Image: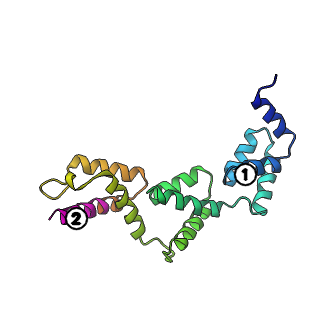
């Protein structure tokens, strides 16, 4: 008796690369790089995989710019900063041009019509991350967080891809916010 995995592999081998790619895309969006890599792992030769992916791009089923915009929306919802978003998209094989286009589309969708991010939305996301970490009771008598807490907050925001200026501004803004509410 054949194992289920073997049957699936035989079924996939009877299909051409385009059909296999279409089945993969049915489970969710992929970048051109991810789809090509996946096809190569399934035993298709490089030329066949590249042709299938190019046909998917031409037919509009694979669009790295759209993928980048959708990923920006998802990652911003998780509180990630631009550095981490770009890093993750790059890891998934999205070109820097497609990342820039996706970021611009995302900003246009969110109502920030500026071509370049003003940093306001980024600062709001960083502050939202910090609010989940600390409360007014974490403020010390001098109106600041302890060095240990500031370091913890900095590490978290850094891991989320925020620049140092944004990190320090967000920590300071939260300290001011908590100090004002306690008075």
Q: Position of residue 16 (x, y in %)?
A: 85, 46
Circle number at residue 123: none
- The residue at the point 63 percent across, 52 percent down is 93
Residue behind mark 1: 26
Q: How many marks?
A: 2
Q: Position of residue 12 (x, y in %)?
A: 81, 40
The vertical placement of 150 against 128, above or below, is above
Please state if 115 lies on the left or on the right of 17 as rendered.
left
Colouring used for the render = rainbow
Q: Kindly state the secondary structure of the residue where label 1 is placed.
A: loop
* Quadrant assignment for the C terminus: bottom left
- Which residue of the protein is positioned furthest toward the top in this rendering? 1
Q: Position of residue 103 (x, y in %)?
A: 54, 66
- The residue at the point 42 percent across, 72 percent down is 118
On whether residue 173 falls in the magenta region, the answer is yes
Residue behind mark 2: 176
| Few, some or many residues within 10 Å of mark 2 (<14, 14–19, 20+) | some
| Few, some or many residues within 10 Å of mark 1 (<14, 14–19, 20+) | few
- The residue at the point 62 percent across, 63 percent down is 98
Question: What type of secondary structure mainly makes up the magenta span?
Answer: helix
Q: Quadrant of residue 64?
A: bottom right
On whether residue 167 falls in the magenta region, the answer is no
Residue range highlighted in magenta? 170-183
* Quadrant assignment for the N terminus: top right
Please state if 157 lies on the left or on the right of 92 as rendered.
left
Please name which of the two marks, 2 or 1, marks the residue nearer to the observer.
1
């Amino acid at each position: 008796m054949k194992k289920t995995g073997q049957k699936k592999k035989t079924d996939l081998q009877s299909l051409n690369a385009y059909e296999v790619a279409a089945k993969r895309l049915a489970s969710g969006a992929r970048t051109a790089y991810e789809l090509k890599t996946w096809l190569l792992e399934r035993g298709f030769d490089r030329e066949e995989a590249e042709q299938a992916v190019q046909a998917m791009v031409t037919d509009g089923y694979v669009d790295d710019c759209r993928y980048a915009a959708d990923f920006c929306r998802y990652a911003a919802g998780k509180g990630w900063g631009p550095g981490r978003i770009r890093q993750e998209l790059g890891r998934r094989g999205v070109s820097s041009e497609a990342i820039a286009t996706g970021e611009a589309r995302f900003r246009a969708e969110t109502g920030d019509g500026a071509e370049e991010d003003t940093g306001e939305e980024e600062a709001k996301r960083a502050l939202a991350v910090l609010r989940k970490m600390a409360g007014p009771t974490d403020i010390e008598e001098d109106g600041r967080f302890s060095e240990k807490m500031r370091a913890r907050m900095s590490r978290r925001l850094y891991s989320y891809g925020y620049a140092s200026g944004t990190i320090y501004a967000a920590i300071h803004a939260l300290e001011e916010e908590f100090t004002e509410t306690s008075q």
